[in-house]
Amino acid sequence: TDALDSLGNTTAATGKGFAIGSAALTALALIASYIDQLGVKGFEGINLSVMEPSVLVGLMIGACLPFVFAALTMQSVGRAAQSVVVEVRRQFKEIVGLMDGKADADYARCVDLCTKASLHEMILPTVVGIVTPIVVGMILGYKGVVGMLAGATVSGFLLAIFMANSGGAWDNAKKYIESGVHGGKGSDAHKAAVVGDTVGDPFKDTSGPAINILIKLLSMVSIVFAALVVNFSIIK
């Protein structure tokens, strides 16, 4: 099954590349739709040059967002995994005969921890994705929002592809060493590969795919709140 899993990682990394490309194109279409919305509201021929201070600041904020989002989701995976580790240790300690294989573990408790974590841990990243376009729009105006969307799309696209590929590579490197090369299981190379895979798994399975959703979410929220930004922003 390791050979199949290794092939699956490679195939998934390729598939995720297409998914990320699709998300980037969707985001570009949504940015065009946002600019079109501004035209409807009487802002035809607006200057969206990078030399515009609002656009430039928005661009910088947008470029930072995927990295902040990725950091939050990576930390979420770490916290969820640690809670399961603590629970497993507790069960080994308290359930008599579990270490000897004479008793069954409380699997439902671990599933419950993972299910709750999967919902609870996404609250902060989601709030970041929803609130940022509104805050940027209210301070920097519609030009800042366009800059933010462009910055998030470009850096998010590159970061997501990097995460999908490097995460799969780390996982496959561990499997490759476990097959017997570079000293096999228990060697220093294997220990290093396990550390790499600990980062690689959330890279390829959590943060990378989630960035696709982030760049689409930013665009959708911006379009929904376009009227609010145009009418009430601090910088016009």
Image (tube, rainbow, N blue to C red):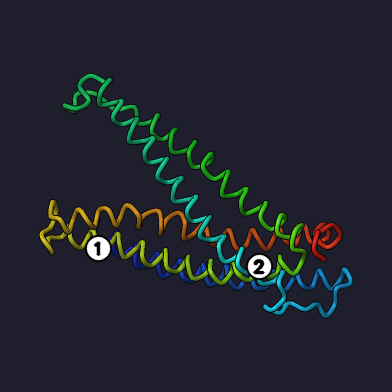
Name which of mark 1 and mark 2 comes first in the sequence.
2
Q: Is residue 70 left or right of residue 175?
A: right
- Up-down: is 152 above or below 138? below
Please give the label number shown on residue 173. Answer: 1
- Compute the Cα span from label 1 to label 2: 40 Å
Q: Which residue is mark 2?
A: 57
Q: Is residue 45 left or right of residue 146?
A: right
Q: Nearer the viewer, residue 99 or 207?
A: 207
Q: Nearer the viewer, residue 31 or 20?
A: 31
- The amino acid type of the residue labelled 2 equals Val
Residue found at x 28% / y 20% = 94
Q: Helix, strand or loop at disc 1?
A: helix
Locate the C terminus by quadrant: bottom right
Q: Is residue 125 left or right of residue 12?
A: right
Q: Helix, strand or loop at disc 2?
A: helix
- The amino acid type of the residue labelled 1 equals Ala
List x then y, in percent, for residue 100: 16, 26
Q: Quadrant of residue 231?
A: bottom right
Classed neighbour count for the residue bearing mark 2: other residues with Cα under 10 Å, few (<14), some (14–19), many (≥20): many
List x then y, in percent, for residue 210: 52, 57
Residue found at x 36% / y 35% = 84
Q: Quadrant of residue 83?
A: top left
Q: Nearer the viewer, residue 114 or 61?
A: 61
Numbered disc in front, either 1 or 2: 2
Residue found at x 41% / y 70% = 14
Q: How many marks?
A: 2
